[in-house]
Image: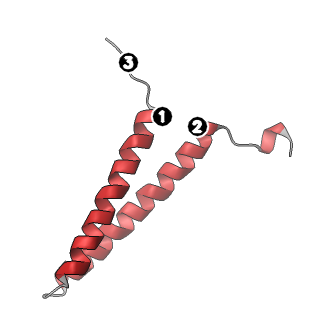
Amino acid sequence: MNASSELNFEDMLMIRLEVLRREHRDLDEAIHALEVTGRPDQLTLRRLKKQKLQLKDQIVKIEDQLIPDIIA
């Protein structure tokens, strides 16, 4: 593999971030669809919301790695 085809660490984080955001969006849509049905399964709903929160935590962690702290 030559140097031009290799991804650096920041590129990998950006790709991972986009995947996590897509999964978060998909879960949000699934939760909304369940809630609209009238009588959603509360256990499934709780599990999906917990999974969505975990994804959000991962997203924030990666964003913190990508965006440097600027001390003003």
Residue 70's tag is 3
Q: What residue type is labelled 1?
A: Leu
Disc with the residue nearer the chain's start (1 vs 2): 2
The answer to which image quadrant residue 32 occupies is bottom left
Local secondary structure at mark 2: helix
Q: Counting residues from the N terminus, which is met first, the one under dot 2 or under dot 3?
A: 2
Compute the Cα span from label 1 to label 2.
7 Å
| Image quarter of the C terminus | top left
Secondary-structure class at tag 3:
loop
Q: In this view, does 39 lie above or below 2?
A: below
Residue annotated with mark 2: 10
Secondary structure of residue under mark 1: helix
What amino acid is found at the position of numbered circle 3 in the picture?
Ile
- In x, y percent, where is residue 2? 86, 41
Q: Residue 66 carries which label?
A: 1
Q: Residues within 10 Å of mark 2 (few under 14, many from 20)?
A: few
Cβ atoms at labels 2 and 3 below 8 Å apart: no
